[in-house]
Image (spheres, rainbow, N blue to C red):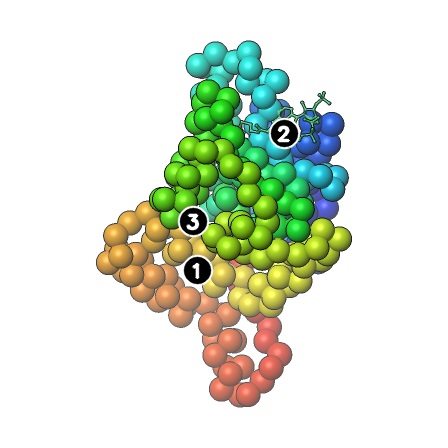
Amino acid sequence: MNNLLLEVENGIAVVTINRPKYLNALNSETLAELSECLSDIEKRDDVKVLILTGSGEKSFVAGADISEMVNNDAIGGRKMALLAKAAFEKLENMRQVTIAAVNGFALGGGCEIAMACDIRVASENAKFAQPEVGLGTIPGFGGTQRLPRLVGKGRAKELIFTTDMIDAQEAYRIGLANKVVPLAELLDKCKEMAKKIMAQSSYAVSLAKAAINAGLDVDLNSGLKLEADLFGVTFATADKKEGMTAFVEKRKEKKFTDF
Ligand code: CO8
């Protein structure tokens, strides 16, 4: 991989987008590598949580690579958008939990890739924006769809139409960031959260993720029906037996095995 770094330790994969010269902007090659890397990680039983971050201390991802897009025609633009769609859908729907460790600029495609993750933890210096309409285009990596789902239609429209850049605290206030931490602690805080998640039944977490994601795309009744079905599925697992037996036996230690 030319543009990504991957480290796996104690159930956590840290994927770093590594194009610091371009503030980690996403070109087609990086998007293709990311897609492949996520497919490989999804197959691994030894990875329960994935943390996505950018290299350096200034930028998470400064957007799609404008120097590539500037010469793209409509066909090239669509190809690039589809590469991103494939990678982002994996982040959103893979069985592992995905946490964006937003360590600086999250602009355009950078804000969009963070939104495709399950959870966003921002460093104090993080900055978020959707600058696309100022470049004569629109968010093409999911921003028009995921931003309103996260912060509401009115706020999403304001951010996209004005291209305003907001800081980490404002992102937290409107629900774009789950929490804000000092930059030096960002990865540790994400790993701390990952450990809490990994202490639960990973299979149950993955079913809860699937229920939340699918439920947001359908009416409430269909979502509740899906939840009931997946709730039922957990009753066939060893983890449900272990979790409930441990409670009844007043036992703190639990040994979850399903994934
Ligand atoms: N693409 C390519 N190169 C970039 C990008 C980018 N998005 N962002 C920064 N760089 C490069 C700069 O060109 C510069 O390179 P060089 O040293 O060769 O000149 C280097 O990174 C460092 O950047 P700056 O010197 O500009 O650093 P500053 O600290 O002065 O500014 C900013 C930092 C504010 C982040 C500034 O670089 C900036 O405004 N970048 C562009 C941000 C942006 O507009 N992002 C949105 C891009 S559009 C997008 O993401 C659309 C997604 C959907 C696309 C659908 C695809 C088909």
Q: Which residue is drawn at 50% across and 44% down?
A: 115
What residue did someone put label 3 on?
151
- Quarter of the picture for ligand 1? top right
Of marks 1 and 3, the one in the foreground? 3
**SS for dot 3:** helix
Would residue 217 be visible to someone looking at this image? yes
Camera-side residue of 235 and 2: 2
The spot of residue 44 in percent (x, y) is: 61, 49
Residue type, label 3: Val
Find numbered disc 1 in the image and state the secondary structure of the residue it sits on.
Answer: helix
Residue type, label 2: Ala
Relative to 67, residue 202 above or below? below
To which residue does mark 2 refer? 25
Find disc 1 in the rendering and name its residue. 208
Is tag 1's residue or tag 3's residue first in the polypeptide sequence?
3
Q: Residues within 10 Å of mark 3 (few under 14, many from 20)?
A: some
Cα–Cα span, label 3 and label 2? 24 Å
